[in-house]
Image (tube, rainbow, N blue to C red):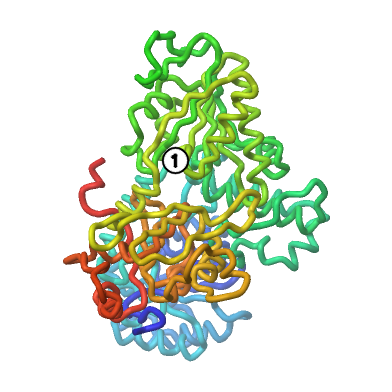
Amino acid sequence: MEAFPTPIGGASLLLAFRPVQKLIIIIGGNTLAASRAFAALEAEAQVIVLAKGGTDASCEELRWRAEQGQLTLLDLDELPTSAAGTEDYWRDAKAIDSFIYGQPKRPHLLFITDTVTSANGSRRSYDSAQYIRNLSRHRAIPVNVADMPDLCDFTFMSTQRFVDPGTGQAGPLQVGVTTNGQGCRLAGRIRRDIVASLPREIGGAVVKVGKLRALAKASDEQVEAAEEDQELNEDGAPVTPNIPVPQRQAEESARERARRRMKWVAQVSEYWPTRRLAQMTDEEMAAVLDGRDGLRSPTPSSPGSSSAEPSLSTPIHDLSLSPPRQGRIFLVGSGPGHPSLLTVATHAALTRHAQLVLSDKLVPAAVLALIPSGVEVRIARKFPGNADGAQNELMEAAIEAARRGLTVVRLKQGDPTVYGRAGEEVLYFRAHGFEPVVVPGVSSVLAGPTFAGIPVTQRGAAESFTVCTGVGRQGKKVQLPGYERSRTLVILMGVARLPEVLETLQAAEGECASRRNGPAYPSRTPIALIERASMPDQRVICSTLRDIAAALESVGEQRPPGMLVVGWSVVSLWEQGDVSILDEGAEHRDDDRLKTWLGEKLWRVTEGLDAGWEDW
């Protein structure tokens, strides 16, 4: 079996060039040349256009940009050694090479655009373009030749640059799509579809996060730490934003403060809704970095808001969410993520009754989008190193709002009572004079594996299941159960600590083994890592305990939230299914089971939901 994925040819090495003050030469005077020139100018490059016939034979846009001093437009026919007037377009290749040699700095890129038919019907021949390409390669200059992909060192993607709503100008966000030469026009359509599906605030969100990131690095006391600590650079940081960090202390060093602030920037980027990011004010940015408060919606409601419902006299078992005249607090579960999995009671709480929503960071934007725009929303700041402080902030905010007569909805991922700290909040609210109503939610413990095609129990494969967490209170290590072939183990919040979890499950002796209650797990035990269960970008990584860490590393960035499912039920419904796992002597066929399940590879990755869910 292969240890790492086999590369499959046909892909592009996608890069984002920043040719600031670098020279780019464009050959041709048509509209395609103008398009290439505009892209280069937006990248702040120096542009020289060589067109046969010069200004008179160039398109209007190139002439205008030359008049404005944005680029240099030269007549290719007037270059030394050129072949003026020739229709072959071959002999001027030497003139182009001589011109390049005479430049004070080597061009960064070369675009040949006159290989497409121009308005006058002329077109550079393949032989001429190939000769120019060969001469440029000799000078180590990458070349793009329009309509001749076999001569190209690089190609252009169909791109979209987003506007910053605050200024109305083009912002830093760009989206690009390539079909690797299989359908350029289709790439444009796909790009348009992607852009249309993104929230309109996406460009402004990137601008605001960029400003937040700059503020996080801004203070003089952080400069030295920033130069030495890769966690202050998102490109060099771990691929998951949930790598544990120490709990926040009353006094911090400059390095600790810098790491915490950049960690929070990463968390905000990962979890807060795009609309909220785009609406951040300078004051809110300072609050995010200094830990004073969570992010609030810009249009909070008041106690007299029209969102309040009249009181109804209905029994508690009817789960009526209509609030009385005094403030009330509801603890509700949002389910695993997909909005269609909300219970009717939770949907009513969010859309009809809430005047303040205090949401966990993992609740997806699709659920938050259901909340009316006039309802105040705060996102929990439960980032690594700040979970306990953020928990207290939210509980205090709920009490303060309820005392003002508001209906507070405390929105939690999954089910509030399954590692959702609902019990702590119930006791806290009760001690302050409020008896909260707890509304169950569809737990990811059951829904997550189901969406991945894994039953937590299955006759002939799994007689029971155990649920545990990968992290204890205040980041302490937890005891994990030992191995039982007939039992499925579901671990929530364990992906960020995957190496530690794997070592604890498999260790035969030592400190790691002491954190396990029972026998060690065989290294060939199946495991599935399920990320963003029930959402369109759900990903399931299947392997064995021995190889799952390498599998996760091979697929790139993580997609929180994630969960781990360990046990033979993971393979029980694969293809034709296997309900003989618990038969006597079945262990001797485990290698064949794994080979049938994974094939010749060490892991399998499945992305997206099964057909049928896109209609919900």
Q: Is any part of residue 519 visible from this angle?
A: yes
Query: Which residue is nearer to you in this view: 451 or 7?
Result: 451
Given residues 269 and 138, the one toward you in this image is 269
Residue sitting at x 45%, y 16% = 307
Residue in the image at 46% along x and 83% along y: 96
Q: Quadrant of the N terminus?
A: bottom left
The outermost residue toward the bottom is: 138
- Snapshot quadrant of residue 30: bottom left
Residue drawn where x is 43% and y is 59% of the image: 564
Left or right: where 339 falls relative to 261: left
In this view, the residue farthest toward the left is 576
Q: Quadrant of the C terminus?
A: top left
Where residue 495 appears, as percent x and y from the top left, is: 50, 60
How many labels, in total?
1
Which image quadrant for residue 51? bottom left
Residue 198's spot in the image, x, y percent?
A: 40, 46
Residue identified by numbered label 1: 365
Helix, strand or loop at label 1? It is helix
Residue 337 falls in which quadrant of the image? top left
Residue type at tag 1: Ala
Is residue 57 something one can see in this rendering?
A: no
Q: Position of residue 111 (x, y in %)?
A: 43, 73
Residue for point 72% across, 54% down:
217
Give the camera-side residue of 337 and 595: 595
Q: Position of residue 587 (x, y in %)?
A: 30, 76
Circle 1 crowding by C-alpha within 10 Å: few under 14, some 14–19, many from 20: some
